[in-house]
Amino acid sequence: QVQLQESGPGLVKPSETLSLTCTVSGGSVSGYYWSWIRQPPGKGLEWIGYIYYSGSTNYNPSLESRVTISVDTSKNQFSLRLSSVTAADTAVYYCARRTPGGNLDFWGQGTLVTVSS
Amino acid sequence: ETVLTQSPATLSLSPGERAALSCRASQSISSYLAWYQQKPGQAPRLLIYDASNRATGIPARFSGSGSGTDFTLTISSLEPEDFAVYYCQQRSNWPWTFGQGTKVEIK
């Protein structure tokens, strides 16, 4: 069974960069697409972007200027960087495996990131 | 961006009753629609993909239908563990988007 676990700071200051890592266990990142999704408190879900294990990416245009997703196959991890954060970026951030069909079949438990000084 | 509008926002039902949740797309998305279930404090779980296909391990009481712009998730007989928030998600047009959710609560 594939398992994903997000890690990173829970508090980020405004204008700084949010950095999260997702560690995949029970399977390999190779051969799959991997995604980041976020959910502001009490609100709906937003797809941030995804990366193929080879390194090709696709980002939500609303965030594209501030987002970088990368993958490290040797560590079986992929990562998210979101720059110039504001309070609007406060959310639970989920990592997930994206199927070839564009669905999300395995998810991490999520990690709350709060943007505040 | 393709907007998905879910209705109703809240559905109040009793265990054993049938639930019908709607998801309407702002433009045609063929059958490229999925449904997820989310319980408090948990990540979403994939229920249905490509409008009508149950994901692995999903009980037969969950079914999906529709194509184009109108879709429905039906739970034939609600079990206590089915009370949760349900989201639809389209993969026809990037960025892939989610609806705002329908909460199924115990009446």
Image (cartoon, coloured by chain):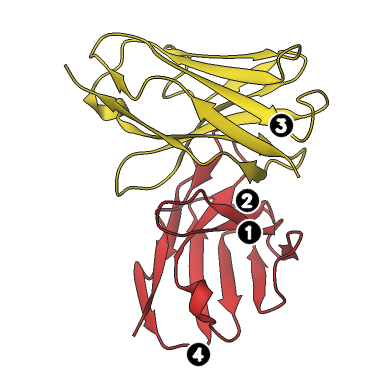
Chain colours: A yellow, B red
Q: Which of A59 and A16 is in front in this view?
A: A16
Residue wearing tag 2:
B29
Describe the element under mark 1 as helix, strand or loop: loop
Using the rendered view, name the quadrant where residue A62 is placed: top left
Residue A11, placed above or below residue B36: above
Describe the element under mark 4 as helix, strand or loop: loop
Q: Looking at the picture, how far across and down is residue B18, in whole percent?
A: 53, 87
Residue at image point 43% right, 11% down: A65
The answer to whether tags 3 and 4 share a subunit is: no
On the question of residue B94 being in view, the answer is no
Task: Give the spatial CA distance, label 3 vs label 4.
Answer: 39 Å
Describe the element under mark 2 as helix, strand or loop: loop
Task: Give the spatial CA distance, label 1 vs label 3.
Answer: 37 Å
Q: Which of marks 1 and 4 is in front?
A: 4
Disc 1 sits on a residue from what chain? B
Q: Looking at the picture, how far across and down is residue B53, in whole percent?
A: 75, 63
Task: Give the spatial CA distance, label 2 vs label 4.
Answer: 30 Å
Query: Amino acid type of disc 4?
Result: Glu
Disc 3 sits on a residue from what chain? A
Residue wearing tag 1:
B68
Describe the element under mark 3 as helix, strand or loop: strand
User: Circle 1: is it few (<14), some (14-19), or many (20+) Cα within 10 Å?
Assistant: some
Residue A53, placed above or below residue B33: above
Residue wearing tag 4:
B17
Q: Is residue A48 left or right of residue A30?
A: left
